[in-house]
Image: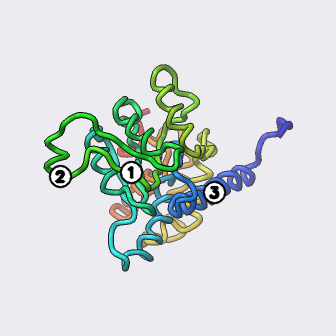
Amino acid sequence: KTTNREESDAEIVERIRERFDMLKDMTKAVKKGDVRAMIVSGPPGVGKSHGVEEVLDRYNTMQMLGGGQQFEVIKGAMSPIGLYCKLFKMADKGKVVVFDDCDSIFQDELSLNILKAALDSKKKRTIHWNTDSFKLRNEGVPDQFNFEASAIFITNLKFDKVKGKLREHLSALESRCHYMDLTIDTDKDKILRIKQVVGDGMLNNYKLSDEVKEDIMDFVDVNKNRLRELSLRTVLKISDLAIAFPTKWEAMAENTVMRRA
């Protein structure tokens, strides 16, 4: 676009919805093996993981009859040898390994080399473990194997904003993956995304009146600059408070989900 006209709220919502629809389509392509790997980047608490897991869960249910776990979500820190063993376990064609918020893996040279081998663009992707290991022998994991599965990385990092040595590491990974930025960069984007997800029924399981749900969204909107985190998780926390303390949830929320003035 060459115009500098500001996007309307409706256009922002449409842009973000389009991105999340694309995320679902890309996840399906990863599951089929048409796309080997994907990096999904966006701020915390906007539904990145949910978008991916929803699609994979559907496949899991369909394939459960065939036995075996079709995808696994890995969260938090992981050692290189732990990563190697996990990839071995999930190495078959049609399986998907989802790394959710595992940014420490990107900073470890050995882990990164393992991932680079796993996602290589060659037809045959062989991963090697070059030192003797009791853990591998103990678990019956060979010191090399072919990886035929796919991978999805869900991260809060914006790769192009990262500097220094980590940037080189991320470039190596990025060149092997499709990179999806969900384009939720401002508080305005976030609040519109949150309203969209709530409007799509996120609070349907909560026994709250429509009026209270509206009050919750107004509370989030008015206090967006003081919330500890502007996210879907915060809306769920406030909804929990509205169930537990129908008459004083706002006072409770001010003390739990907001930073002190």
- Choose between 134 and 108: the one closer to the eye: 134
Residue 89 lies, in percent from the top left, at 30, 56
CA distance for labels 1 and 2: 17 Å
Q: Quadrant of the C terminus?
A: top left
Q: Earlier in the sequence, mark 1 or mark 2?
A: 2
Around disc 2, counting alpha carbons within 10 Å, would you say few (fewer than 14), some (14 to 19), or many (20 or more)? few
Residue at screen point 63% across, 57% down: 22
User: Which is in the foreground here, disc 2 or disc 3?
Assistant: 2
Amino acid at circle 1 = Asn
Residue 32 lies, in percent from the top left, at 53, 64
> Mark 3 — residue?
22
Left or right of 134? Residue 35 is right
- Which mark identifies residue 146? 1
Q: Which picture quadrant has residue 179?
A: top right
- Choose between 127 and 57: the one closer to the eye: 127
Around disc 3, counting alpha carbons within 10 Å, would you say few (fewer than 14), some (14 to 19), or many (20 or more)? some
CA distance for labels 3 and 1: 30 Å
Residue at screen point 37% across, 29% down: 109
> Mark 2 — residue?
139
Around disc 1, counting alpha carbons within 10 Å, would you say few (fewer than 14), some (14 to 19), or many (20 or more)? some
User: Which is in the foreground here, disc 3 or disc 1?
Assistant: 1
Q: Is 152 rendered above or below residue 51? A: above
Q: Which picture quadrant has residue 21?
A: bottom right
Check if mark 2's residue and mark 3's residue have beta carbons within 8 Å.
no
Left or right of 52? Residue 99 is left
